[in-house]
């Protein structure tokens, strides 16, 4: 599930795609394993790592292969491929990409299993659940400059277009990064968010609202 730009999209275990409309889920044609929505538009990848972009209500196959993609950056794209390589697309390229020969991907050094970009920068986790922040990322220079290791362990991480950062660890617990500002984009500390004894596998945030999926694929919406 992914929330951004005031929209919410998700995919189920069968690859069916849904959008949240008027308090209900409406099915979108196609099949994906991961979907993302944000300033760069609506993008997704399927089980073969093929990349798609939604244009005019239809999916267009795009250049490249990714296993996870994120459109939450300030107009630019980020993602990781099947080799855990980190890739990004600058804003101008991302917005104008409309053909299977576009866009052009920039390779970022390092290895990650999940990469997410938002208002104040990009966050990622690797196969060891280490957390990293990519500094000096801009719409025209999505590569940024250096990785900053953040204390803690998470198995997935999402940063919203409002700058908020949430993640889930290997124990299926949800955490929020506190103290994030434009001057302190990496924040200060992690706070555990407890919702009963529920175990989670994914979290996404937008407009002050949380969308979570549990380990049994149930959806929880927190306002």
Image (cartoon, rainbow, N blue to C red):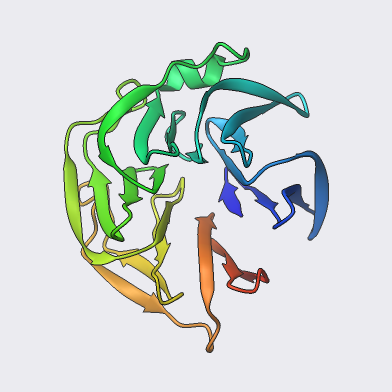
Counting the numbered discs, the total is: 0
Residue 3 position within the rendered picture, expressed as x and y whole percent measured from the top left = 58, 51
- Which residue is located at x 71 percent, y 56 percent? 12
Q: Is residue 190 left or right of residue 97?
A: left
Relative to 209, say whether 199 is above or below: below
- Residue furthest toward the bottom? 197
Pinpoint residue 89: horizontal percent, then vertical percent: 42, 24
Return the x and y of residue 90 as percentages of the image width and height: 40, 22
* Residue 54, quarter of the rendered image: top right
**Quarter of the figure that contains the C terminus:** bottom right
Q: Residue at x 70, y 57 (%)?
A: 13
**Residue depicted at 30% across the width and 23% down the height:** 141
Residue 223 visible in the displayed image: no
Q: Is residue 146 left or right of residue 96?
A: left
Depth order, front residue of 64/118: 64
Which of the two residues, 186 or 106, is positioned nearer the viewer here? 106
Q: The N terminus is located in which quarter? A: bottom right
Q: Nearer the viewer, residue 196 or 32?
A: 32
- The answer to whether one can see residue 34 in this image is yes
């Amino acid at each position: 599930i992914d929330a951004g730009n005031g929209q919410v999209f998700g995919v189920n275990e069968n690859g069916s795609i849904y959008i949240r409309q008027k308090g209900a889920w409406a099915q979108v044609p196609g099949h994906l394993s991961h979907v993302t929505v944000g300033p760069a538009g609506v993008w997704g990848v399927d089980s073969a790592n093929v990349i798609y972009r939604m244009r005019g209500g239809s999916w267009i196959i795009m250049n490249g292969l990714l296993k996870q993609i994120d459109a939450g950056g300030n107009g630019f794209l980020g993602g990781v491929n099947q080799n855990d390589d980190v890739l990004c697309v600058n804003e101008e390229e991302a917005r104008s990409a409309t053909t299977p020969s576009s866009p052009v991907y920039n390779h970022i050094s390092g290895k990650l299993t999940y990469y997410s970009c938002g208002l104040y920068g990009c966050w990622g986790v690797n196969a060891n659940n280490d957390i990293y922040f990519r500094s000096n990322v801009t719409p025209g220079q999505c590569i940024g400059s250096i990785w900053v290791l953040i204390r803690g362990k998470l198995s997935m991480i999402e940063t919203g277009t409002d700058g908020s950062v949430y993640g889930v660890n290997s124990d299926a617990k949800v955490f929020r990064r506190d103290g994030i500002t434009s001057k302190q984009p990496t924040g200060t500390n992690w706070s555990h968010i407890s919702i009963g004894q529920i175990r989670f596998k994914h979290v996404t945030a937008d407009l002050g609202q949380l969308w979570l999926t549990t380990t049994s694929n149930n959806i929880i919406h927190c306002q």
